[in-house]
Image: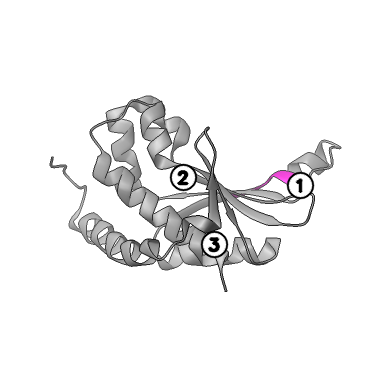
Amino acid sequence: MTFKLATPLCAVFIATTAALALPLASSFSPALATVNDDGVIKVKSVYGFDETIARLKDDIGKKGIKFFLAVDQSQLGASAGIKLSPSTLLIFGNPPLGIQFLTSNPDSGLDWPVRLLVRKDSNGQVWAVYTDFAWIAKRHGITDREAQFKMASDVIASITSSVASK
């Protein structure tokens, strides 16, 4: 399978991302995460809420991934008069990689760019939560992007491993 990249810089970015992600992701321990039947992966953070967000954003930036937005859901709740435990949705991605999924199935835009939820549970434990990319592929019936889904999975595992241990 071949695909055309928008610029030579995109090719360098993708190769660099893969080179950085694969060694880091291989050190990611599945024992640090849980995967539900609905494709939700939960990674327990060893840091507090704000530090978890800061570390994730820092790691995203260090990998050269574009950070789009942080949505403070607990602040949205407060503005609606609803108390919500700390919860922030981080939205980021690598357009040269992520847009390929949309070319396979435009409805996969529901899941791109990447969303990573940081939340604190009622016991004070902080979690980094995201949707498994294999589950996303199955959801949208995408069968022609296996290598890209693997790369995305390796990168998100690497990013979340940055808060799973000190």
Q: 41 or 72, which is in the foreground?
A: 41
State the separation of the CA atoms marked 1 and 2.
Answer: 21 Å
From the viewer's perspective, is residue 11 above or below residue 166? above
Q: Are marks 2 and 3 in contact (CB under 8 Å)?
A: no
In the rendered structure, the answer to whether residue 10 lies left or right of residue 24 reads left
Mark 1 or 2, nearer chain start: 1
Q: Is residue 94 visible?
A: no
Mark 1 or 3, nearer chain start: 3
Mark 2 or 3, nearer chain start: 3
Quadrant of the rendered image containing residue 43: bottom right
Tag shown at residue 56: 3
Residue drawn at 79 percent across, 43 percent down? 84
> Is the image coloured rainbow, by chain, by secondary structure, or in one colour?
one colour
From the viewer's perspective, is residue 99 above or below residue 128? above
Q: What's under tag 3, amino acid-wise?
A: Leu
Q: Are marks 1 and 2 in contact (CB under 8 Å)?
A: no
The secondary structure type at the circle numbered 1 is: helix
Tag shown at residue 1: none
Q: Residue furthest front?
A: 31
The secondary structure type at the circle numbered 2 is: strand
Which quadrant of the rendered structure holds the C terminus? bottom right
Residue drawn at 53 percent across, 62 percent down? 57
Q: Nearer the viewer, mark 1 or mark 3?
A: 3
Q: Position of residue 138 (x, y in %)?
A: 37, 29
From the viewer's perspective, is residue 72 above or below residue 158? above
Q: Position of residue 73 (x, y in %)?
A: 70, 44
In the rendered structure, the answer to whether residue 43 lies left or right of residue 155 reads right
Q: Which residues are magenta?
A: 70-75
- Residue under label 1, please give it: 75
Q: What's under tag 2, amino acid-wise?
A: Val
